[in-house]
Every structure is written in structure tokens, then in C-alpha cells.
């Protein structure tokens, strides 16, 4: 049977105390032990641990069976890698750091041109009686397309659709007017 650190002789870093976490009793994997040993190596290299204490903690890390035991070994050290599983929070008071630094994050999407939206809406309304909205849809569609070319905003498709619907609405009502006059 493996020696358990809390039942053996007192360790130089103090008796083992359970970590108040639901994951403390979860069984640790080899990768978890290696991450803990990496934290101990960094602490030893920085002079935070003496060679004897470092050796004892590394031995205890390789004998550890649970996350709680591993967490206790590094609880008094600043640690980079987490020794708890992804679902557990080691220090709930710390803010969550984004995975990608803002420098490398994609830029936010460009805003949509408001005139393009208005052109599309008026183009759809252009088929209402008398087609009054067709002409403003046509004008706003062309103005929006010229603004989009300069500013790089989104909405080129909406501006095109608004202008096309403006032309179609105008042509539709012109045909209706011609049929009424001719009839």
C-alpha cells in the first residue's frame, strides 16, 4: 500500500489539509502529477524551495492519488498551471482571462450602413399603392453603396437589393399607370 502523506510523519510544509472543493476527492492522473511537479520545479528554480523540501514534495506528488493532495503540495506556491480539472475553480476570486490576447483577436465586424437598411425597407414598401417609397429606395440604395465603398461598412447587399427593388417598384407602378391611362 502506498504511503499517504496525511497518515505518515509530518511533512516540512505542514500537515495535509483537504482542499474545500468538490474536485478534491477526484482521482488524479499522471498528467496532473506532472503539472504539479512542473510547478514544484519552477518554485525550486526560483529559490522558493530548498533541495530537500523539493525532493520530498516531488515524491509526494508522484504518490498522490487525488487532486486535493496535489493542490496541498503547491498551495503555498505561486502556480501557473492549474492542478484542478477544468470544471473546478482553484481561486474563484480571480477574473477569467481570455484565451486569445486582444492583440491577436480578430477585429470586430464593421458596422452596417444605416442608409442601406433604409433602402432595403423602402424597396420592400415600394410595392404598396402608388409606389411612393420606390424613388427614395432607389436614391438611398445608390448613396449607401457610395458610402460603403469609402467607409468599408457592411450592407452592400442590402443597398443593392434596395436599389433593385426601387427600380422594380417604380417600373411596376409605371406599367400600372400606363395600363390605366391606355385602358
Image (cartoon, rainbow, N blue to C red):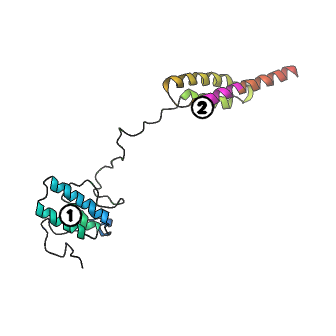
Image position, residue 7 (x, y; %):
18, 76
Image position, residue 174 (x, y; %):
77, 22
Q: Is residue 18 visible?
A: no
Q: How crowded is mark 2: few (under 14 residues within 10 Å), some or many (20 or more)?
A: some
Magenta segment, principal secondary structure? helix
Q: Is mark 1 on a helix, strand or loop?
A: helix
Give the Cα distance between marks 2 and 1: 60 Å
Q: How many callouts does the rendering have?
A: 2
**What span is colored magenta in the figure?**
158-167
Q: Residue at x 31, y 61 (%)?
A: 84
Residue 132 falls inside the magenta stretch: no
Image position of 161 with respect to 94: above or below: above
In terms of image quadrants, where is residue 182? top right
Q: What element carries label 2?
A: helix
Q: Is residue 61 left or right of residue 149?
A: left
Q: Which residue is drawn at 13% across and 58% down?
A: 49
Who is closer to the viewer here, 47 or 83? 47
- The quarter of the rendered structure image containing the C terminus is top right
Asked whether the beta carbons under mark 2 and mark 1 sit within 8 Å of each other, the answer is no
Image position, residue 6 (x, y; %):
19, 73
Who is closer to the viewer here, 93 or 65? 65
Q: Residue beneath label 1, please? A: 73
In terms of image quadrants, where is residue 116? top right
Which numbered tag is attached to residue 143? none
Q: Residue beneath label 2, please? A: 157
Image position of 174 with respect to 64: above or below: above
Image position, residue 40 (x, y; %):
20, 59
Residue that lies at the very extreme toward the right in this rendered image: 183
Who is closer to the viewer here, 183 or 76? 76
Q: Which residue is drawn at 16% across and 75% down?
A: 8
Amino acid at each position: 500500500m502506498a504511503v499517504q502523506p496525511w497518515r505518515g510523519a509530518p511533512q516540512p510544509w505542514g500537515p495535509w489539509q483537504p482542499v474545500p472543493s468538490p474536485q478534491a476527492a477526484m482521482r488524479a492522473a499522471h498528467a496532473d502529477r506532472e503539472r504539479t511537479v512542473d510547478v514544484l520545479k519552477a518554485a525550486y528554480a526560483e529559490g522558493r524551495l530548498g533541495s530537500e523540501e523539493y525532493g520530498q514534495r516531488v515524491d509526494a506528488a508522484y504518490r498522490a492519488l487525488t487532486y486535493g493532495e496535489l493542490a496541498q503540495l503547491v498551495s503555498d506556491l505561486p502556480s501557473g498551471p492549474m492542478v484542478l480539472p477544468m470544471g473546478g475553480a482553484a481561486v474563484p476570486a480571480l477574473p477569467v482571462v481570455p484565451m486569445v490576447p486582444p492583440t491577436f483577436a480578430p477585429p470586430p465586424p464593421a458596422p452596417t450602413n444605416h442608409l442601406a437598411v433604409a433602402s432595403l425597407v423602402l424597396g420592400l414598401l415600394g410595392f404598396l399603392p402608388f409606389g411612393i417609397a420606390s424613388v427614395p429606395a432607389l436614391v438611398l440604395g445608390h448613396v449607401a453603396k457610395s458610402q460603403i465603398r469609402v467607409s468599408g461598412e457592411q450592407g452592400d447587399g442590402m443597398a443593392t437589393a434596395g436599389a433593385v427593388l426601387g427600380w422594380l417598384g417604380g417600373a411596376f407602378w409605371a406599367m400600372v399607370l400606363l395600363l390605366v391611362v391606355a385602358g
